[in-house]
Amino acid sequence: MNILVLNAGSSSIKFQLLQLPQGKVVCSGMVERIGGKDAILSYKTDATEFKKETDVTTHKNGLTKIVSLLLDHDKGVITIVNEIHAVGHRVVHGGKLFTDTTLINEEVKEKIKEFSSLAPLHNPHNLEGILIAEELFPEAKQIAVFDTAFHQTMPVKVKKYALSNKFYDENDIQIYGFHGTSHKYVTAKALDHLKLESSKIISIHLGNGCSMTAVLNGKSVDTSLGFAPSNGLIMGSRSGDIDHAIIFHLVHKLGYEIEDVEKMLTKESGMLGLTGHVDLRDIQEKAANGDKNCQLALEMNAYRIKKYIGAYAAAMNGVDAIIFTAGIGENSALIRKMACSDMDFLGIQLDQDKNDERAGKIREIQNSDSKVKVLVIPTNEELEIASQVYDLVAH
């Protein structure tokens, strides 16, 4: 079965065409830095591979370019659209309603749209991908895999806010958690690698969006993102944790409109607000060249990660391993080093040579004295999504 997976993030689209159940990747690629003329389009098959800068101003524009590549006479991998049997879509917010992989129909699309207010940087792009895929692949089954599903195992004491009970009982206001597909995939890989019968693992997903999850015996028991994918760690353009009184101050004392505050906290804050740059590669380069704002932003970023490592070690009464994954987690040796420094009380000690290595496979980067395993595990949300789609469609 040919399954096309679309994973639309806040500033990127990753895609893979896979053959299941073999798990063979027919082609893969990514559109990065969506929103400008310096977007990067990468594409790889067994026969060809390239990366180039291109003009991608919207997610719709990016998705159209991806489909054109799949059908390209020279570089493509399909000749007609009906060769795609199913399209798996990563959808960030599924609320309480969607707890498992779901066949998309009109009602599902309406609910995804409804939840867009909770994930404004993601659900609209996820829905746009669905609508475009329905148009371009009319015979394929469209399947949604929700980021929030993995976190359904969190106990009520964790996911309930200290608000009047009616908001939890009647309005579904609670911690949902996100990046569940990634956290689920990498923790499963870690458990297989470590061969542990019982486990306390902290999964650290660092990309333009960032989150951490405490995983006890393979189940999510706490996570840094909450009602919407906006709090917790410092992210590309999102502030992460913030005192909500600041919002009241901005509106009542400084005269901001609430819509402007929402835009600022989700699209103009985080590393972008601190440095003027959203891409960590640019920030690290400028920090190395003496930019004080970039240096401070990196220190703040790593400090927030360290705080959550400590919190989740306390929540699980220990930690066997921590995982770094996603674009920054897998590729930034600097962030890994800064986040794991001065953590001797937990027994976390990196081997700097191992940390500096670049390899697209699971690897341990702690030294021989470390009491905690430190793993770098490439996430593969696309394979996880495809596997869930196959399980739904084929059975």
Image (cartoon, helix red, strand yellow):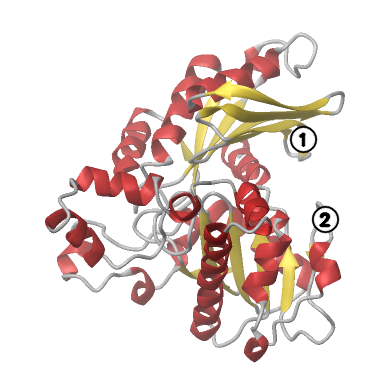
81, above or below 1, in the image = above
Image coordinates of residue 312 in percent, x first then y, are 52, 78
Q: Is 281 situated left or right of 317 in this image?
A: right
Residue at 53% over, 46% down:
278
Viewer-nearest of discs 2 and 1: 2
Image coordinates of residue 365 in percent, x first then y, are 79, 70
Q: Quadrant of the N terminus?
A: top right
Residue matched to label 1: 25
Q: Alpha-carbon distance for marks 2 and 1?
A: 22 Å
Residue matched to label 2: 358
343, above or below 258, in the image = below
Label 2 SS? loop
Q: Residues within 10 Å of mark 2 (few under 14, many from 20)?
A: few
Q: Nearer the viewer, residue 75 or 277?
A: 277
389, above or below 78, in the image = below
274, above or below 91, in the image = below
Residue at 48% over, 41% down:
10
- Name, please, the residue furthest toward the front: 290
Residue at 49% over, 82% down:
315
Q: Earlier in the sequence, mark 2 or mark 1?
A: 1
Please tell me in which quadrant of the rendered image residue 225 appears.
bottom left
Image coordinates of residue 242 in percent, x first then y, are 34, 65
Label 1 SS? strand
